[in-house]
Image (spheres, rainbow, N blue to C red):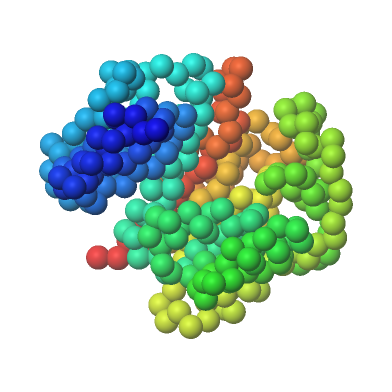
Amino acid sequence: MPTLRRRILEFLPRLNVHVKDLESGAALVTRRNGYRVTPVGPRSWLVRRGKDGFTDQISRMAETSSAKKWSSVGLGPNAHLFVNGKQDDADEFQMQKAAQDYMGARHVAALLRHYQVNCVFDVGANIGQYGRRLRQHGYTGRIVSFEPVATMTEKLRRAAENDPEWWVYPYALGREERVDTINVVYGSMSSILDPTTFGNERYKRFRNTRSQEIDIRRLDSLMDEALKGIDAPRSYLKLDTQGYDLEAFAGAGVYKSEFVGLQSEVALMRIYEGMPRMAEAIEAYEAEGFEITGMFPVTREETTGRVLEFDCVMVRADAMQS
């Protein structure tokens, strides 16, 4: 039988009051519509509105016994972060990770708009998480995804099948074209490189791998085809190849200067043999004219708090159009 609270919440829309359920015992109640609620962790939500005055119109959490546990943090004139103050360390870790992922995606989406990007090269696409996130954050241009692991490529194709501007290639990218093998690992950690001792200790999944033969292509050999039909290409390069980013970047050849921005996972701790450390990777990108706009933690050890990898987002400032 519905509780009195539920009956009240169901009645409020008749009074032009908008109700958004968050979880059992908590709801967001506002007098204006047009807000968006994004979960960013256990009992944490980011609430945004696209019009001025949102801060004044955020009403209150529904009056429940748990309402007073919530805190609201302003993130500019049109966004608030609601957090349940009662979170243990594990909840806090998950909330921060989800919030950082979300803010990183927002940062990239804003850069793509600001630099008028119309083609994103998604290298190491896995099952299409990055492409879907681009679409969710409003990017409408072409996406060109590369994923060599056959089982992942099939899922990636399904993710892109109803999107004519999302192209999929079943290749790895590198500095030279050849046939090689990749270590197929559960999830998104398959790599051409072998894991280090640290990697084996950190990720138990490395103990259950299999090999797959793959084609490695140079990016510069595919650029003309990938950009076909775009009159004035403004491209962005996203690299997530589990330790092979600099090799894939090298294969772009003279096209490196054509990218207005790039995004690469840079490592503080070597998970794979031969992968570059963060300083080496950033130095290589800076040598090609890219400058950092944001660093977002990808993985962090819960026990020590240290970051293992960052998503490094960079742009070529002279590519900014007036």
Q: Is residue 197 left or right of residue 315?
A: right
Q: Nearer the viewer, residue 94 or 70?
A: 70
Let me know if residue 203 appears in the view: yes
Q: Nearer the viewer, residue 104 or 205?
A: 205
On-image quarter of the C terminus: bottom left
Which residue shows up at 59% across the image and 63% down it?
Answer: 159
Q: Is residue 133 left or right of residue 279?
A: left
> Where residue 12 appears, x then y in whole percent?
21, 41
Q: Give residue 37's quadrant in the image.
A: top left
Let me know if residue 262 appears in the view: no
Q: Is residue 64 above or below residue 243?
A: above
Q: Is residue 131 left or right of residue 39?
A: right
Q: Nearer the viewer, residue 127 or 202?
A: 127
> Where residue 257 appears, x then y in whole percent?
49, 64
Q: Is residue 186 left or right of residue 11?
A: right
Which residue shows up at 51% across the image and 57% down it?
Answer: 132
Q: Is residue 132 above or below residue 16?
A: below
Give the number of callouts: 0
Which residue shows up at 13% across the image and 36% down it?
Answer: 56
Q: Give residue 204's quadrant in the image.
A: top right
Q: Is residue 158 above or below residue 12?
A: below
